Image (spheres, rainbow, N blue to C red):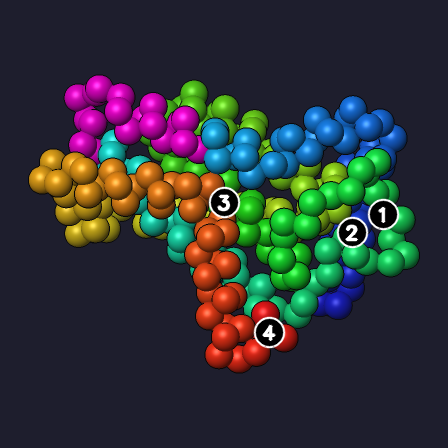
Amino acid sequence: MIYAFVSYLRDIDLVLFHTINFYCGQSLMVDHIVAGLESFQLKGLALMGTFGVLWFQRTKTQARQRETLVLVLLAVVLSLVVARTLADLLPFRQRPMFTPGIGYRAPLFQLASTFEDWSSFPSDTASLVFVLTTGFWLLSRWWGLLWACFSIMAMAARVYFGLHYSGDVLAGALIGIGVTIAINNEFIQARIASPIVAVEQRAPAIFYGLLFPFIYEVSTLFAFTRSIRHTIVRLFFGFGAR
C-alpha cells in the first residue's frame, strides 16, 4: 500500500515536471527570460528591496515590524538547516537534468554550474523564498501576494530547467512556511528579536555593518559561507571531500 502510494506520487511528480519542462529548449528568448527569473541576482535584489522598504517604513508598530523581519532572517537559517538535514538523511534524489531516460529537455544555452551536487529533495531555494513570502505576508498582505507570485514563478523556473521536480519545490516551500510560522510567536520575539533590534538603537553602525552582509549572504543561500566551509573541509580531509 505504502509503496503504491509513493509510486503514485512519483508519477504525478514526473507528469508535472514534463508539463513545465516541455517548453524548455524551444525558444532561446523564452529560455533567457526564465533564466532571469531563476537567477539569484533577481532574488537578491527583490529581497534587499523589500526588506529595506519594510525595515525603514515609518509606522506606529515599526519596532514590532523590525522584530518580525529579524525573525524572518532567523527562519531562513533554520529552514535551510532543516532542508539540508533532510537532504542528507533521506535517500539521494538525482536532479532531473542529470537523470537519464526521463525525457528531459535542455535549454538552448549552457546553464551556469552554480549549484552543488546535493540531493534534489527538498529544495532549499524553495525554503528560502517561501520563508520570505510568509514573513512579508505577516507584515503586509500586498507584499505577501507579490512575493507569492514571484516565488511561484521563480520555483517554476527551476523545474523548467530541470534543477528540481515539483515535489522538491513543494516540500521546500512547506518547510519554509512551517518554520516561519512556528518561530513567529511572542516568546521568541521577546527573547531573540527584541534584543537584536535594540542593538540598532545603541550601536547603529555595528548593527547595519552586520545586517547588510548577512542579507547578502541570505540572498545567495550563504554562498560565501559555504565556500569557506568547503575550503576548510578540503584542507583537513582532502580535496576529494564534499
> Callout 3, which amino acid?
Thr
The magenta stretch is: 47-64
Q: Whole-Å distance between the Cαs marked 1 and 3? A: 27 Å
Q: In which quarter of the image is residue 7?
A: bottom right
Which residue was labeled with disc 2? 97
| In the depicted structure, whether residue 32 falls above or below residue 117 | above
Q: In which quarter of the image is residue 109?
A: top right
Left or right? Give the position of 105 relative to 138. right
Q: Are marks 1 and 3 in contact (CB under 8 Å)?
A: no
> Callout 2, which amino acid?
Met
Left or right? Give the position of 155 relative to 210. right
Q: Residue at x 60, y 74 (%)?
A: 239
**Which is more N-terminal, label 1 or label 4?**
1
Q: Whole-Å distance between the Cαs marked 1 and 2? A: 6 Å
**Which is more N-terminal, label 2 or label 3?**
2
Q: Position of residue 189 (x, y in %)?
A: 22, 46
> Callout 4, which amino acid?
Phe
Which residue was labeled with disc 4? 239
| In the depicted structure, whether residue 165 falls above or below residue 239 | above
Pair 4/2: label in front: 4
Q: Residue at x 73, y 29 (%)?
A: 32
Which residue was labeled with disc 3? 220
Q: In which quarter of the image is residue 121?
A: bottom right
Q: Which numbered dot is residue 104?
A: 1
